[in-house]
Each structure stands twice: as C-alpha cells, then as structure tokens.
Image (cartoon, coloured by chain):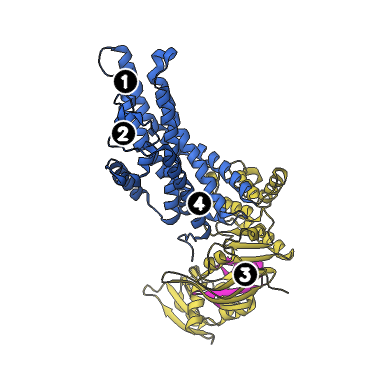
C-alpha cells in the first residue's frame, strides 16, 4: 500500500479512536477550567458593574498565558508522547508494524490525527472564552483581531510542540516527566531572557506570531505576554516554526522506520 | 521442496540476554512446530521471521528477501503474537476490519474478508461486542482472525491455543491443519508438546536460544521416553503398592514421604509404568487420591537432555 492511502487510514482510525477515548473527556474538562473562571467572572461583572473586575481583563491577563504558555505545550507533550509510546506500552505496535504499510505513515498519520484533536480541544476553550467576554455586547464584538491572532498562534504552538515531542518520543521512552520539566523550566524562563538566548525556545517563535505593536503599545491586551520579548520577523518566525514541524515529524518518521521497539515479552 | 524461510547463523540478543543464537534453518511449506520451554527463544525467532526485530548477526530471508521493515512482504504474512494486541475501544469487527483495510483491500473486499476471518474463528455472533468484554479465549481467537484476514502464505502463530476452550481448541487445530494442507507455510510455537503433536509431525526443538533438534516428532517422543520420569502416587497403602511394583526392573528408585501417604517412583518407561499402575490399582483395590508427574514437562526434559 502506498504512503498516502496508509496515511489516510491511520489518520481516520486514530481520530475515531481518540474521539471515543476517556482521556479526551479529561483533557476537555481540564481545558474548561479557565473557561469556567471566565464565565464566573463575566457573571460577576454583569451583576456588579462597578466592581472593577472584568472578564476582558481576565481574558487578556490570564487566559492568554494559560492557553499559550501552559495548555498548548502540555497537550502537545501528552499527545506527542502518545504517538509512539502508547503503541509500545499497549503492545499494539505489532498490529501496525506487521501490516503491509510504510512505517512512516504510522507516525505522520498519528501526528496529524492527534494534532487535530489537540487543536480542537484548545480552540473550543478559546472560542467559548471569546463569546463569553462578548456575551453582553454581541452587536459590537471586541478583541476580534486578538482572537484570530491567538487562535493562529495556538495552532502553530500545538503543531510545533507536537512535532518536537513526537520526535523525542521516537527516541526515548517515558519522557513525560522530563517533558514537563522542559516546559516549565527551559521554555517558561529562557524565552524571557534578553538577547539571542530566547530564540532557543519554541515559545519565542510562538510569541513572535503575536502582534508586534503589543510590545510598543502598552494598550494592547497582549502586552502582558510580551514582557522582555524581542520578537523575530514574521518571515523568520514562519520559517523557523515550519522547520521545527518538518524536522520533528520527518525525523520521527525516519527513526520509527528504522528503529526496533522491544517489548517486554520479546524472548 | 524449496525453503520459503531461510536463516543463516541467525543470532539475536537483548543486552546481555540471549534471544536466539546461530540458528540456520530452511523452512518449507507445511506446518512446522516450534517447541521449547518458556524463555527458550521461540518468540524472538517468531519476531525475527515477521520482521519486528533485526538480527544482530546472520541473516533471515523470506523467498530470498530480507524481512525487517520490508512492508510489501508483510502482505503475505499473518502473525498472531503471544501477547494481547488490540485497541481497547474497538469491537471485534472494527479490529479485524481495520487490519483488512491496512492490507489494501477495497471496501467490499475488506468487509468480505473480515466476515470470513471472524466466522472462521467463531466470533460472528460477538463481532459487535467491545473487545474488552471478550473472554481470554475469544480475544485469542480474535488475534487469530486478524492474522488470517489477508489469507497469508506464511502464518506465524505464537502460542495460539493459550486460553482457548477445548471445543475451539480442536477447531483451531483443524484450521491450522487446513492451512498446512493448502500448501501454506505455518510456524506454530508452543511449550506444550501434545498441542504441537496434534498439528504436525515436523518440529524444531529450541532451547536456550539454540536449535536443539529438528525433524520428526517421534524422535522427540523417543527422547521423552528415555528421560527418567518421576511419578508421585498418593494412596491409602503406598507400601503395598510399592511392594508390588518393585518387581519390575524399569523402576529405578522408590521413595516414601514422611507421612507415609505418598510414594514417588522413578522409571525410564513411563507408558509401561502407567499401564501396570492402572492394573494394580484395579486388581488390588487400592484407593488412589492423586497421581502427579512433577518433572513431566518440556523444561525438565530439556534440562535432562542438555545435561546428558
């Protein structure tokens, strides 16, 4: 069977599998927590208009940080780790690798399937958040530009982090703890360092997708995210993110094609 | 007949642990029994044949082609692994159908092949149940359905009868024999000699990663018979039983336990011993509560043969 047909089969199978999986409900529930906070704030804002706390403020100062800096990398880590390692752990790898399909189609098909699911989870939260802050003035919707920019940045974040973690998953087993350490140490702090160092994080490139005027103009709701940010040009950002995605996925596929995955019962 | 599967000095190890060592074989169409105790290297051998593992040394080919990651070749192979291998959220039908799709069949053919495979293992009535609701025997039969859905020329079955009830055991054995008769190459691994004996006369004995012997199963039976057997009998009067049996020269040793309720015989002619034991029990009206043969397993036989 050729790569394209195998890729389609793997992709559709794993999308269906994931839609039935319990963990999807857990991920959705976790992604709903910030939304719930926003809804409660909005209710409070409407009922006590002079309290000084607004849902828009929460959206700009908390939600963006949570979605971009926490949820996108974590979802990408968990799904990226699962791409290969869940097949090894559940011993279903044999089912796929004894089928007459190119091995590369397994990694790429699963990568795209899980990316789509992760993007779906995170965008659902973002869309609900967006409508929540605008619920009492739907005639004059605000933050439309930020909504689309943030949506695009989140999609890029999922694709880039997923590619990175899928690549790591092709090389290493059980790296989720290490992945969390990486997200909450290297990625979280190094991208705040001035100079070239911040370019060694994926987060730098994701944040470079956000409007550049957010740095200069303190008015923007995105400025909170941009502290110490020395954004790269859009062209450079798109190029680097594309390279991260391509190298990650192609690299993982090549490793998976040539590597033996030894299961405990092999002898 | 031309060998379909060929190995030359095939060796595979995991760190310091030996899987298989210097195996040189030519396997022709028909059923080949791969027999050996647990940990002998049977599963490693199977995984090398189905292209899951690479040899560390030596070569393995199917029809002259190397196997590892040679995916077009996999269309001709059916592999039933020893371990469970299914997607938890699937029904039996979905699992087999997905495999049929991965074999490149169009929709109609995939449905037809899936139905046939599921029917052959008797799961048609339960095809829409979730696999997690299947019994161990049903899951085992489902694995078999997955391995035969592409009607392979080479069928590799690693402990295929584990957990299957007696009725289906007979039917699966017949299914395997039918594959052999159809000129397919079938390798069945097991650590249970009688299981293999029911399917084929042609066996490979594997122990500690090496091929210990291969050929006709009667040769192995002969080895088994030459192995001194230990037979333990618990009865009302062990001394009386021992006294009667003592006259026979094929009993080499007799031991009583401390409680005087059990006697252990050592014999080199197990079948003759059991014939005689049955007659004595009936003729002398001895009430027997238990007869066991503690060393009547492949591991014991192999240990004996290796030591010899």
Closer to us: B295 or B196: B196
Label 3 vs label 1: CA separation? 67 Å
Instruction: Indicate the chain on which mark 1 is placed.
Output: A
The image shows residue B299 at horizontal and vertical percentages of: 49, 73
Q: Is residue A81 visible?
A: no
Q: Residues within 10 Å of mark 2 (few under 14, many from 20)?
A: many
Q: Which residue is mark 1?
A: A41
Residues at marks 3 and 2, CA–CA distance in whole angstroms: 59 Å
Instruction: Name the residue located 53 percent from the left edge and 64 percent from the top edge.
Output: B53
Dot 2 falls on a residue whose secondary structure is: helix
Asked if the stretch drawn in magenta spans residue B197, the answer is yes
Q: Nearer the viewer, mark 3 or mark 2?
A: 2
Q: Quadrant of residue B60?
A: bottom right
Image chain in blue: A
Q: Secondary structure at mark 4?
A: helix
Between A225 and B203, the one nearer to me in the picture: A225
Image mark for residue A226: 2
Residue tagged 4? A250
> Which mark is in front, 1 or 2?
2
Q: Is residue B145 left or right of residue A205?
A: right
Q: Secondary structure at mark 1?
A: helix
Closest to the observer: B170 or B207?
B207
Name the residue rendered at 53%, 53% in the picture.
B85
Q: Specify few, some or many for label 1: CA neighbours under 10 Å numbering under 14, 14-19, or 20 or more.
A: many
Task: Please give the range of residues in magenta.
Answer: B189-211
Q: Colour of chain B?
A: yellow
Q: Spot the residue most to the left.
A: A51
């Amino acid at each position: 069977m050729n790569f394209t047909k195998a890729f389609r089969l793997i992709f559709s199978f794993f999308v269906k599998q994931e839609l039935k999986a319990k963990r999807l409900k857990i991920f959705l529930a976790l992604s709903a927590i910030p939304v719930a906070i926003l809804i409660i704030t909005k209710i409070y804002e409407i009922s006590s208009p002079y309290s000084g706390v607004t849902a828009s403020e929460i959206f700009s100062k908390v939600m963006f940080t949570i979605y971009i800096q926490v949820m996108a990398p974590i979802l990408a880590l968990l799904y990226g780790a699962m791409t290969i390692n869940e097949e090894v752990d559940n011993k279903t790898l044999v089912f796929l690798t004894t089928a007459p399909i190119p091995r590369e189609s397994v990694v790429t098909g699963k990568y795209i399937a899980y990316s789509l699911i992760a993007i779906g989870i995170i965008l659902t939260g973002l869309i609900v958040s967006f409508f929540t802050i605008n619920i009492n003035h739907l005639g004059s919707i605000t933050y439309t530009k930020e909504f689309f920019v943030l949506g695009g940045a989140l999609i890029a974040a999922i694709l880039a982090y997923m590619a990175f973690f899928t690549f790591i998953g092709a090389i290493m087993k059980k790296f989720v703890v290490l992945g969390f350490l990486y997200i909450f140490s290297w990625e979280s702090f190094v991208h705040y360092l001035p100079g070239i160092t911040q370019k060694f994080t994926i987060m730098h490139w994701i944040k470079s997708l956000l409007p550049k005027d957010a740095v200069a103009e303190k008015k923007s709701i995105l400025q909170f995210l941009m502290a110490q940010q020395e954004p790269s040009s859009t062209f450079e950002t798109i190029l680097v993110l594309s390279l991260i995605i391509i190298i990650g996925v192609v690299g993982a596929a090549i490793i998976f094609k040539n590597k033996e995955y030894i299961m405990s019962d092999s002898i | 007949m031309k060998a379909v599967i060929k190995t030359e000095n095939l060796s595979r190890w995991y760190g310091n642990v030996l899987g298989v060592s210097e195996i040189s074989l030519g396997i022709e169409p028909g059923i080949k029994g791969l027999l050996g105790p647990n940990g002998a290297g049977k599963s490693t051998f199977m995984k090398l044949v189905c292209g899951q593992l690479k040899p560390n040394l030596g070569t393995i080919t199917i029809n002259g082609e190397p196997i590892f990651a040679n995916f077009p070749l996999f269309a001709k192979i059916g592999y039933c692994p020893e371990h469970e291998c299914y997607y938890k959220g699937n029904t039996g039908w979905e699992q087999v159908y997905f495999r049929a799709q991965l074999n490149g069949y169009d929709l109609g053919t995939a449905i037809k092949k899936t139905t046939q495979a599921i029917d052959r293992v008797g799961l048609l009535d339960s095809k829409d149940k979730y696999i997690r609701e299947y019994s161990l025997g049903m899951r085992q039969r489902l694995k078999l359905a997955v391995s035969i859905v592409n009607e392979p020329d080479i069928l590799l079955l690693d402990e295929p009868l584990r957990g299957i009830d007696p009725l289906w055991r007979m039917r699966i054995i017949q299914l395997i024999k039918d594959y052999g008769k159809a000129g397919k190459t079938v390798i069945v691994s097991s650590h249970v000699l009688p299981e293999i004996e029911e399917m084929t006369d042609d066996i490979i004995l594997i122990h500690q990663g090496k091929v210990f012997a291969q050929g006709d199963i009667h040769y192995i039976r002969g080895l088994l018979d030459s192995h001194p057997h230990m037979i333990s009998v618990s009865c009302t009067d062990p001394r009386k039983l021992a006294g009667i049996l003592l006259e026979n020269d094929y009993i080499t040793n007799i031991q009583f336990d401390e409680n005087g309720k059990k006697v252990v015989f050592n014999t080199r002619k197990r079948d003759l011993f059991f014939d005689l034991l049955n007659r004595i029990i009936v003729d002398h009206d001895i009430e027997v509560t238990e007869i066991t043969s503690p060393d009547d397993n492949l591991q014991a036989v192999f240990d004996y043969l290796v030591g010899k």
